[in-house]
Amino acid sequence: MQQLTDPFGRRIEYVRLSLTDRCDLRCFYCMPKGFNDFEAPEHWLSFDEIERVIGAFARLGTRRVRITGGEPLVRKGLPELAARLHALPGIDDLSLSTNAVQLARHAEALKAAGVQRLNVSLDTLDTTRFHEITGGGKLEKVIGGLMAAKATGFSPIKINMVVMKGVNDGDVEAMVDFCIEHGFTLRFIETMPMGDTGREANAHFLNLQTVRKRLEQRYELVPDVMPGGGPARYMRVIGTELRLGFITPLSQHFCETCNRVRLSVDGTLYLCLGQEHHFELRPLLRNGIDDDTLDNAIRQAITLKPERHEFNDKPGQVVRFMSMTGG
């Protein structure tokens, strides 16, 4: 079996696949207010092109694919694509990141297509605060999507909460109790200076070590692990099944174990969330590249993967914002 390895000896076994840069919410840390300069549909990779690229990654040893956006559920035909990716030889972990606004009507089809795990972005359970953070979103739609996914049998369902000082840091305990009640996993995420939106949010940066210490005053926490390809460090709340994940790209970066790349909707491979290193696959695909040459192009792309991000040293370096890159 072939295996992709970057210049620093890290095995690349995880692709985060963005189906769109569009979203039905406008979280202020992800997308600029009033932005409408989205990628033209003719530049989107088609489902056939996506299947070719992910098939090539699978031949090279990639086992995990996470479907992301923007918001992936705004792209028509997602369950069909999920079924095609699930059927690819070698892909044994297919998951989805979503804001869950449209999840209630798609949950059963996604489960039938082979999506195994869900990550749901949810930063607060306060209706007014949710409306403010998301630029007008309705919390009840997200809760409805979560309950539909739970009823459909998705497991685990992970809640991703970006914790921001002075915005939603007072909502942490309520989210912990909500996840205990419903059997969800909860993951806290630090803000990152991605584009102007991310740098605005970074004014609300909160070191998650302070959140962990605060939670230790109320709950008994012990180290734990969860299967998956992501960077979270987990704790379990004693007396419950709840696992708390801490994703700390700034306060405790995890670059030395980074095993992932991101494929944007226009076919650009981004080799690091915090750097501008990239490799464009769409022109090659549309010029009729064969499978062997595609495999070699991906190998070449992986040689560009940098050792680490520079969010702390050069916070203004990354000009693209999060929804352009993929989650």
Image (tube, rainbow, N blue to C red):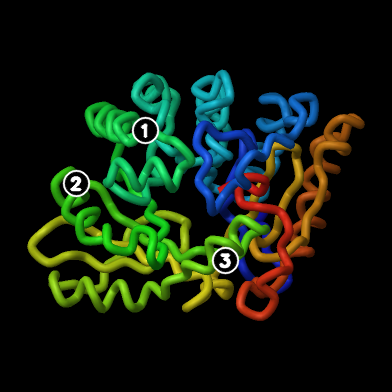
Q: Position of residue 222 (x, y in %)?
A: 20, 73
Q: Is residue 208 left or right of residue 256?
A: left
Residue pointed to by mark 1: 138
Q: Is residue 287 left or right of residue 123?
A: right
Q: What residue type is disc 1 on?
A: Lys
Q: Earlier in the sequence, mark 3 or mark 1?
A: 1
Whole-angstrom CA distance, mark 2 to mark 1, is 23 Å
Q: Position of residue 280 (x, y in %)?
A: 82, 46
Pointer 1 local density, CA inside 10 Å: few below 14, some 14–19, many at least 20: some
Q: Residue at x 73, y 31 (%)?
A: 45
Q: What residue type is disc 3 on?
A: Cys
Element at label 3? loop
Q: Is residue 143 left or right of residue 55?
A: left
Pointer 3 local density, CA inside 10 Å: few below 14, some 14–19, many at least 20: many
Q: Are marks 3 and 1 in contact (CB under 8 Å)?
A: no
Q: Is residue 245 above or below residue 320?
A: below
- Examine the image and state in which quarter residue 65 appears: top right
Mark 3 or 1, closer to the camera: 1
Q: Nearer the viewer, residue 231 or 11?
A: 231
Q: Residue at x 35, y 48 (%)?
A: 129
- Examine the image and state in which quarter residue 304 appears: bottom right
Residue pointed to by mark 2: 183
Q: Position of residue 307 (x, y in %)?
A: 68, 74
Whole-angstrom CA distance, mark 3 to mark 2, is 28 Å
Q: Position of residue 91 (x, y in %)?
A: 53, 40
Q: What residue type is disc 2 on?
A: Gly
Element at label 1? loop
Residue pointed to by mark 3: 258
Q: Residue at x 81, y 42 (%)?
A: 281
Whole-angstrom CA distance, mark 3 to mark 1, is 34 Å
Q: Earlier in the sequence, mark 3 or mark 2?
A: 2
Q: Nearer the viewer, residue 309 or 296?
A: 309
